[in-house]
Amino acid sequence: MTRQTRERMIEALLFASAVTAVVIVLLIMVFLFKEGAPFLIRYGIHTFCLGMEWNPIAMDGEPSYGIFPMIVGSVYIAAGSLVLAVPLGLGCAVFLVEIAPPWAQALIRRGIELLVGIPSVVLGFFGLVLLVPLIRESAGGFGFSILAGSVILAIMALPHIISISADAITAVPETYKQASLALGATRWHTIRNVILPAARSGIAAAVILGMGNSIGETMAVLMVTGNTPILPEPLYDVLDPVRTLTANIVIEMNYAAPGDHREALFATGIVLFVMVAILNAISHRVLKSRMEAGR
Amino acid sequence: MGTEDIEIESRNLNLWYGSAQALKDVSIPIEKNRVTALIGPSGCGKSTFIRCINRMNDLIKGCRITGKVLFEGRDVYEKDVDVVVLRKRIGMVFQKPNPFPMSIYDNIAYGPRIHGTQAKRELDEVVEDSLKAAALWDEVGGILDKPALDLSGGQQQRLCIARTLAVKPDVILFDEPCSALDPISTARIEDLINVLKHDYTIIIVTHNMQQAARVSDHTAFFLLGEMIEFGETKQIFERPVEKSTENYITGRFG
């Protein structure tokens, strides 16, 4: 085999592996839409997404497939997790990059890596046996709640938010910091007024990406949120149980009869897919605008 | 020069980065309202030296200092010296223009805001005065809300000078302020330094010997961490005492 043909073969091989990844994504999309889209059109996107009642196995009358409470549940829990994880993660990232001595940096980075490695079902189990009773006893309600879901998701989102924001903070030119300190600013003032604003688009991207991940998370959330497909009442009650879009699919997939019910679950998948895709697109847009602004 | 005119004085200053000694026993008196130039080949310790004066070396891990840097008779390395006040009084302009990614106005107002000026009218005044003093007002007076990073390199550097002036320092340290600029921008900065020396004590590190000769009253020549020779600029350039100074000035190395 000549060197040239070998080179060609390697290129072809690499091309094939790249194409495979894309093809898999496309196939999943095609399948998802093939299974779910007809139902979505038949039942009406509007009635499906904004319908208040999810009752696929109606004892009497027509079954109803409204996923609005679950969209609210997913967004609610994801947003709640960010409210908890962003301040904590950002604080940790600032400490990590700007303040921590080398030994503490090493320790924190190890800790973050470990946190990423914990399977979500283990976290969910931890939430089930520790967090849910804790909330039930200290705050009331069932314990299975938006709050429990948000806390568990926050723990899962934390390492990603820390590492992406830490990268963004590290990328701020050292010269900004020096200029600020040379003007007599304290370290904290420099962090707050120069470093964080300069890193803000990177941090925003981290937050949006974190939101996308949180919306897509299933197992851990399923175990602690109670899974009732009803809007919280009143709407701001974070101690109420909710069901997320992801949980909806997992819970009902094994007994959904072929036909409307099964297809409705695929349609749920489509809605989820679109939501995550939009969040990812926004996050990419934000990152791109940072590169353009960073002359 | 009379001792009452000495604003800054280093005495037997030694500095190590880890185990590498970057300054060896450097003693220089810096006169008030004069321009003192530090010249010498790359890596000779001149930038390190001026960073001792406003304690920017504090940021570097493993940096160790012995000896004294007196500012108005007081050692800046004494325990109870407030670094914030020190850096307010001893400003610094860096090698590469480093405006913040904010508007021109906010860049200048940054320092005064840190030090407690909040009133809009007062800030407006400081911004205008500083930009005028840095000979930039005519060019940017009408576009104060534009991003500072849109300015040209030379304008950015004058903006950095204005930003330093805005906190009303007594001393300005220039760390090779023109090394990233074209000849016309360089000339403007030099003119500016000649004006500023009436009100400020200036120390300038430069690679450019013509620049040192043009703008400074005193010159110190550094080599391998040692201060080889210090004197009136005219004397250093016309009748250097040390052989190595003469070699450097006549371009035999560096």
Image (cartoon, coloured by chain):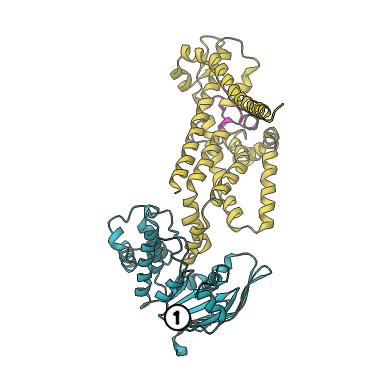
For label 1, count other residues whose C-alpha is less than 10 Å away and answer few (under 14), some (14-19) or many (20+).
Answer: many
Residue under the point 50% across and 31% down: A233
* Residue B74 drawn at (x, y percent): 52, 82
Chain A, colour shown: yellow
Query: How many numbered marks appear?
Result: 1
Output the letter for the chain in cyan.
Answer: B
Residue B80 seen from this side: no
Quarter of the rendering containing residue B213: bottom left
* Vertical side of B26 occupied by A144: above or below: above
Q: Which residue is mark 1?
A: B233
Task: Please identify the dominant SS of the magenta region.
Answer: loop
Viewer-side residue, B238 vs A199: B238
* Vertical side of B170 occupied by B140: above or below: above
| Magenta segment includes A221 | yes
* Residue B157 drawn at (x, y percent): 40, 62
* Residue A182 drawn at (x, y percent): 48, 66
Mark 1 residue element: helix
Residue B168 seen from this side: yes
Viewer-side residue, A207 vs A260: A207
| Magenta segment includes A170 | no
Extreme-bottom residue of the structure: B2
Residue under the point 42% across and 67% down: B115
* Magenta range: A215-244
* Residue A82 drawn at (x, y percent): 54, 41
Viewer-side residue, B34 vs A38: B34
Identify the chain of the residue marked 1, using the numbered disc in the image: B
Locate residue A231 relative to residue B152 in the image: left or right: right
Q: Amino acid at mark 1?
A: Thr
* Vertical side of B68 occupied by A133: above or below: above
> Which quarter of the image is occupied by the N terminus of chain A?
top right
